[in-house]
Amino acid sequence: MPHAIVVEGLAKQFRRYHADRPQTLKEAFVRRWQHIRAGERFWALRDVSFDVEPGQLVGIVGSNGAGKSTLLRLIGGVGHPDKGNVKIQGRVAALLELGTGFHSELTGRENVFVSGVIAGLTRRQVTQRLDSIVAFSELEPFIDSPLRTYSTGMQMRLAFAIGVHTKPDVLLIDEVLAVGDLAFQQKCLARISQFKADNCAIVLVSHDLGQIRRLCDKALWLRCGRLLAQGEPEAVIEQYVAEMETETRRKTPTEWPVRTTPEGKELRVHENRFGSMELEIVSVRMFDRQGRPAIELRSGDPLHVEIDYSAPQRIEAPVFSVTISTEDGQACTDLSTAAAGVTLPMLEGEGRITLHFERLDLNGGRYYVDVGAYKQNWDYAYDCHWHSYSITVLPTDNKKGFLHPPHSWEFGDISHEPIQK
């Protein structure tokens, strides 16, 4: 059987411009054309070779700037390599930047037709698949509303739904599987598995190493544009993680103090604390409705999580997150400023950010509150505290599961108004 993708000696070069490059013709003239030309060139990819068989899922790992997205774009036909070549068998679908080509003033339905045609479908094919696309996106009530009224998550759902309905022979995925809530992510992963079973060759770029381990048949490790390793996912990931840990230890200042949580637990880098420390989470406190330290709460009570931070240098629009999970690591809720549509300003110095839970509808048990601060667009972590803060929820009655949301039962006759509540 012929390979679905063959990459041979692929190389791509880009220009790097001066940071003080003029932005307008007038500015260039006033500065006497200084810094208008590219200062130097750099290789985003160098001598990359591999192949992908039909029905094979290949994962690509590597730090930011390693060339992963550039590689996917060249495979997808976006741009031309400076050296080497790419051979593709069959139709290609690329989920590189969800929402590319969407128009904010068009409705969701109209954007489905526009994006479907851009993806290579005929108008008739889009019409035939429209109901399935809308159903997959779970946006039926909003499909005839202008796209400008959609949240970012809704736009990503719609874009993913369009992409997976093109029935490709080769599917390229660049960090887009964190779409929507957990249930929708599972639906996306199920569709990816279905493509794989149908003999579609899939190339996946992801920073989620657990996802690469679970899903992929082969992994590639890129560093500074070069392919350092390829083979079994577990073996490749072990090499990648080992180097990243060595690099982090080299970059992390040894003078960072060992901090202690209110429970007396020490926060130690590489154990229960991770990140570059450009922005440091200094302390985390939890309070109940009376403003007292929250060690125990009753199910349904409010909770306030207060995070103090310190940024010695300017940090542009960081993302803060709070995850509540069980003792065995199952996430009950995962909240962030980005998901809430909150864009933080440029931070410098000391400050505080607080998350207010109006009510914590968890069943009785012991839970961990994990906090983190990340670079804009989730590129990497500044400071994350993992399983270092715990809280006990006292049950209101004997219930199973994690959640205990407000609810009531209603009884009534089939042909009459409800008679009892």
Image (cartoon, rainbow, N blue to C red):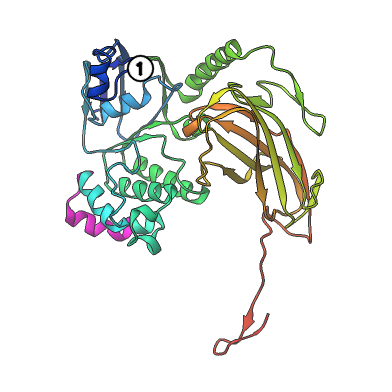
Residue 233, above or below 325:
above
Main secondary structure along the magenta-highlighted residues: helix
Kind of residue at disc 1: Asp
Q: Note whether 166 is above or below 58 in the view shown.
A: below
Which residue sits at x=52%, y=35%?
Answer: 345
Magenta residues, start to end: 119-133
Q: Residue at x 79, y 60 (%)?
A: 396
| Residue under numbered circle 1 | 20
Q: Is residue 132 magenta?
A: yes
Camera-side residue of 35 and 107: 35
In the rendered image of this protein, does residue 33 appear above or below residue 73? above
* Relative image position of residue 179 (x, y in whole percent): 45, 44
- The percent coordinates of residue 370 (x first, y second) are 66, 37
From the viewer's perspective, is 60 left or right of 235? left
Q: How many marks?
A: 1
Residue 208 visible somewhere in the drawing? no
